[in-house]
Structures are given as C-alpha cells and as structure tokens.
Image (cartoon, helix red, strand yellow):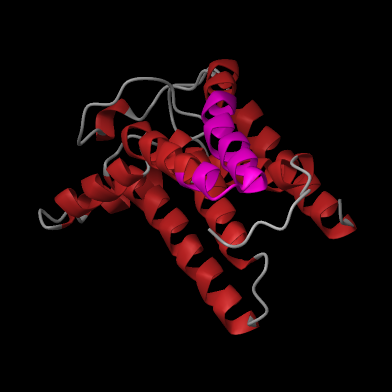
Amino acid sequence: MKKKNIIIISILILLFLIIGIMVRNESGGILFDKIILNLIHKNENPILFPIMKGISFVGSAYFLIPFVLVLVVYNFYKKKPYTIKLLLISTLGSYLANFILKNIFNRTRPLDHFLVEQGGLSYPSGHSMVAMTFYMTLAYLFTKNMRDQKKRNWIYILASIMVVLMGVSRLYLGVHWPTDIIGGYSIGYVYFLISIHIVKEKDKDQPI
C-alpha cells in the first residue's frame, strides 16, 4: 500500500474513533450536531422531501444490494473476477462492517428530528459509509485503465457528489446526527482503500 494511503487511513481512523468515543452509548448530539439539524429543519421545503427520500432510497440496501448483484452477474458473464471480488468485498462487506460498528458504538438516532420512520442505531451512518465505498469503488473500476485524466477527474467528482447527497439526504430526513455522517464517510473511505489493497488484481479487467 502507498505511504500516502497509509497516512490517509490513519488520520481517518483516528477521526472515526475520536467521534465514536464521544458518542458511544449516547442519545443526544455532540459538538455541532444539534445546531446543524435545527438549522436544516427550520428551513424544511415540501418539494425537497420526496427528492431527499428518493436519494436516500438509492443508498439503501433495498436498492444497492440488488444493483450490486446485477453488476456481479454482468461481470461474471464478461469474465472479470477482479471486478466481482472488489464489488462484493467493498460494498456488501461494508454493510456487514457497518452493522458491527453500530452495535459497538450503540448511539441512538436523533428521534426528535425524524421526518420518516427509521429503526436501528445511528453511528456510523450506514447510508454514508456504504455510499462512500460503493461509489468510490465504481469510480475506481471505471477509471483504473483510463488514461484521460480529465475524464478520470469528472468520474470521481460525480461519485463524490452522490456520496455528499446521500449524507445530506439522511440529515434532511432527520435520521442521523451530522457526526454520524462524518463517521460514515471516514470509515467508508478507509474500507474502500483497504478493499483495493486486499483484492489483488491478477487479470486485465476492462472498465465495467
């Protein structure tokens, strides 16, 4: 693994753990959590609600798991084992990792801000974590054999926009604290980098 990635992973894990220690077994917000949620919900817009709900659905297991499985079947047909392994480990593995982490930190969701019904625990945000691993993995797979740097940059920008929108949607719907989103992004990117390192490329898969 590159030294740069090791430094990034170390910083993000430290950030994740610092927030995690502060929120463990907590039911309220910390730092800027309440300020941001109150600000968002003072400016609610009925037009935005279905949009944010739709974005949130795209980051849910009901959408992503079937979508990933379709990609796996397609890449199985195209004989791209590296792509299949990376999609499964980085995305479906991220769901399992998130479940374990949520139960370790045991943080309650911001119940007073709910605009939709949502069960489960709060830290780290599963939508944010999985969106980070999934869309960054897609960007990586699309660009790993691409020589045009401008196209590579645009693909990563589009992936980043999707990741940011996912976090914003969860805040707007009131089902996560802002620090849940930060934690999800942090550990999600760590999981993405580690997945690439774990899954060794042994073939010449073309972009999916």
Residue 88 part of the magenta-drawn span: yes
Asked whether, in this view, residue 3 is left or right of residue 81, the answer is: right
- Residue 1 in sight from this viewpoint: yes
- Residue 86 percent coordinates (x, y): 63, 43
Is-magenta flag for residue 78? yes
Give residue 22's quadrant in the image.
top right
The residue at the point 87 percent across, 56 percent down is 2
The residue that appears at 72% across and 40% down in the rendered structure is 13
Residue depicted at x 58% and y 75%: 153
Q: Nearer the viewer, residue 29 or 46?
A: 46
User: Residue 50: x, y in percent?
Assistant: 15, 49
Residue 60 at x, y = what percent?
A: 35, 37
Q: Does residue 103 appear to the left or right of 1 in the view shown? A: left
Q: Is residue 55 above or below residue 121?
A: below
Q: Position of residue 9 (x, y in %)?
A: 76, 47
Asked whether the viewer can see residue 128, the reply is: no
Identify which residue, 133 or 34, lies in the foreground: 133
What residue appears at the point 53 percent right and 32 percent down from the top-left corner?
Answer: 92
Count of residue discs: 0
Most frequent secondary structure within the magenta stretch: helix
Q: Residue furthest right?
A: 3
Q: Which residues are magenta?
A: 74-98
| Viewer-side residue, 59 vs 102 | 59
Give the camera-side residue of 203 and 100. Answer: 203
Question: In this rendering, is residue 79 above or below 138?
Answer: above
